[in-house]
Image (cartoon, rainbow, N blue to C red):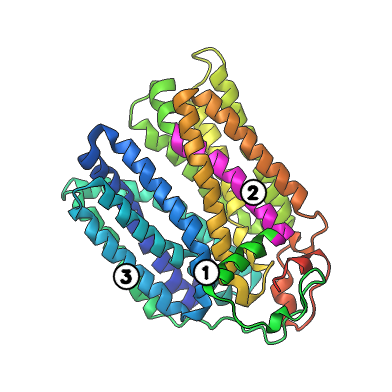
Amino acid sequence: MLSVLRNPTYRRLFCAQVVALTGTGLATVALSLLAYDLAGANAAAVLGTALAVKMAAYVVLAPLVGALADRVPRRALLVAMDLARAAVVLALPFVDRVWQVYVLILLLQAASAAFTPAFQATIPQVLPDERDYTGALSLARLAYDLESLASPVLAAALLTVVPYAWLFAGTAAGFVASALLVRTTTLPDPDPDPAPDPAPDSEPKGIGAAPRPGAYAGAVSGIRLVLAAPRLRALLALDLAVAAAGAVVLVDTVILVRDTLGRPAGDVPLALGAYGAGSMAAALLLPRLLERAGDRAVMVRAAFVLPGAVGLLALGLALPPGTWSWPALLALWLVTGAAGSAVLTPGGRVVRGSVRSRDLPAAFAARFSLSHACWLLTYPLAGLLAATAGPAASAAVLAAVALAGATGAAGLWPREDPAAGRGTPAPASRERGSRVSGPSRSTSSP
């Protein structure tokens, strides 16, 4: 997995991702403290609204930006969005009204909605080899997990010597460092696909020669691309399963630890750390596992683990008090994190093998938007149910949602799909100049 860092272009991009993620983790802590300063006891409501604004920005803006991504030089877009995020973060310490926080969060996430899909679409062009790309996906998953574990520790250390407002400066420094690393990196041009495969019979003939669509049409076409391909529809169902289980972890953990189990506040990050540890362990094991079993087998089976784990939580919470235990919660969160990582990490391989190179920005942007729509649904659902009916009901309902997602993915993803085997052959087949046939052909864009 670490061998991909020998590629100098990817090494710079990965370093840019790590420093930006570290800064983002600092901002998460600082934003919580800022919300408390502005709203006091209502800080949770402020953060919840800010999170909803974040998800709404991702859902609405990512497809539009993805449609524009191939019209702007990729490196210029990435650098501009990093600098925009740095500027917004530097303004956060100076706000004195809650509504100002919401406006700045909207601007910040709009820039992220532009940056992230464009960055994701760049990696498969930098690493055309399937094994290298799989290693890069696992490294990216590890970077996210390490950020969730290391950033709070770093923030706590910094808060012993500086006010929390300085954490925003650290976030801005991370974005600026990311911009400098991208600016000094030569990125490959998107594959022009000089001899693309003909459109499927179900699509209008001659669409490949049509003029480039406008931004709105391009955004709609990216979403239609995801919704039209069986594997990508299955991927969306898998995202729903992960979002349902993940919402229980991220929203209900504090209630489970503090109220249900009566544990001290310091155990909340330990529980979340177990979730991150499981995710990291899965990311380390996935490259070899995907070579042996293939994307479909690994992702669909892991998806069925998610409702099982959350369902066990609901069952345990429904038993008499004292039955549920702290080690059991840690074990379930460890398993949930591992299963979620096994579903999420190979997602880029599935997108890459389902569309042509020129459609990667739009496809990644549409998937980014639609997957966050799942979180936009499950976050408030988990919180509302936990507050009104209790954590047991919250876990039970979201276990059912996760089961529906896993079942839907199993039905939507053809068992005989060649791309469900060892790797995704579509890009390699194009490189050899041959036509992709069979079920995977139907997932190519027009």
Marking on residue 238: 2
In the rendered image, residue 69, in percent from the top left (x then y), is placed at 50, 74
Q: In the figure, is residue 171 to the left or right of 391?
A: left
Q: Image point 38% across, 69% down: which residue?
A: 81
Mark 1, secondary structure of its residue = helix
Residue lying at the far bottom of the rendered structure: 194
Which of the two labelled residues, at mark 1 and mark 2, occupies the earlier sequence position? 1
Q: Is residue 207 above or below residue 251?
A: below
Mark 2, secondary structure of its residue = helix
Q: Amino acid at mark 1?
A: Gly
Q: Amino acid at mark 2?
A: Leu
Mark 1 to mark 2: distance in Å?
A: 22 Å
* Magenta part of the chain: 228-252
Q: Is residue 194 above or below residue 279?
A: below
Residue 211 can be seen in this image: yes
Q: Is residue 55 above or below residue 393?
A: below
Q: Which residue is mark 1?
A: 66
Mark 3, secondary structure of its residue = helix
Mark 3 to mark 1: distance in Å?
A: 19 Å
Marking on residue 83: 3
Residue 22 can be seen in this image: no
Q: In the figure, is residue 390 to the left or right of 165?
A: right
Q: Amino acid at mark 3?
A: Leu
- Circles 2 and 3: CB distance less than 8 Å? no
> For the stretch drawn in magenta, what is the main secondary structure?
helix
